Image: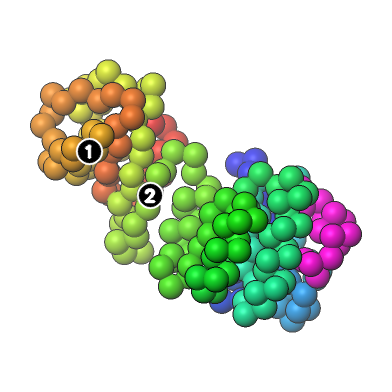
Amino acid sequence: MNKQFAVIGLGRFGGSICREFAKMGYEVMAVDKDIERVNEFANIATQAVQANSTDEKALKALGIRNFNHVIVSIGEDIQSSIMTTLLLKEAGVKKVWVKATNDYHHKVLDKLGADRIIHPERDMALRVAQLITSEKIIDFIELSNEHSIIEVGVTDKLSGKTLTELDIRAKYGCNIVAIKKGNDILVSPIANVVLRQGDMLVVIGQNKDLNTFENEGV
């Protein structure tokens, strides 16, 4: 687990993202200009820092360009959100995900080159955390505290093999409920269907089994 994340803005949404990263075992730096919020995450995040993210020197002092992903979750201060996003992109941060407050905010962030724009009313914190920490999961839906559905792309390891050969249910305890082949969706696919690169697998199972499948089976 060598990925490092930074969350700027520790309100309800940013705080939830930070907690999810910590639960998943990833290194995360929590940043906010409010010292009380920073203190709240001192024992949760790998590092909790009070800083003004609109200050270019302050961001450089944090070594912000060394982080794989930075999530900007600044609340109602749209100007600070925009300026922070601009500074992060100029600093060369590879992935900048930003919470948008409204459509106007979204349009400005898009023009600034934000890699992904998040609307909290449509994106749960856990779903965002799962997507951002995985190279393989294309989409994620939480069904309960223990069960989820994931969408993963067919890799070289799976390509050219049938479901029978892979025997994913016996090996990992997961079930492939559908396969997307271009514009076609095969629901309850037959056992001898051959997987090809570009196909997408829709897999359901317990979270622990899905994690094992993601790490070992794909």
For the N terminus, the image quarter is top right
Q: Secondary structure at mark 1?
A: loop
Q: Foreground residue, 80 or 187? A: 80
Q: Secondary structure at mark 2?
A: strand
Judging by the rendered image, the residue that carries numbered circle 2 is 139
Q: Which residues are magenta?
A: 52-65
x 73%, y 63%: residue: 84
Magenta stretch: includes residue 63:
yes
Judging by the rendered image, the residue that carries numbered circle 1 is 183
- Compared with 76, 139 (above or below) is above
Q: Amino acid at mark 2?
A: Asp
Q: Which dot marks residue 210?
A: none
Magenta stretch: includes residue 101:
no
Q: Residue 21: where, in percent of width, then height?
A: 57, 57
Nearest to viewer (mark 2 / mark 1): 1
Quarter where residue 174 is shown:
top left
- Compared with 177, 29 (above or below) is below
Q: Residue 149: where, in percent of width, then height?
A: 30, 51
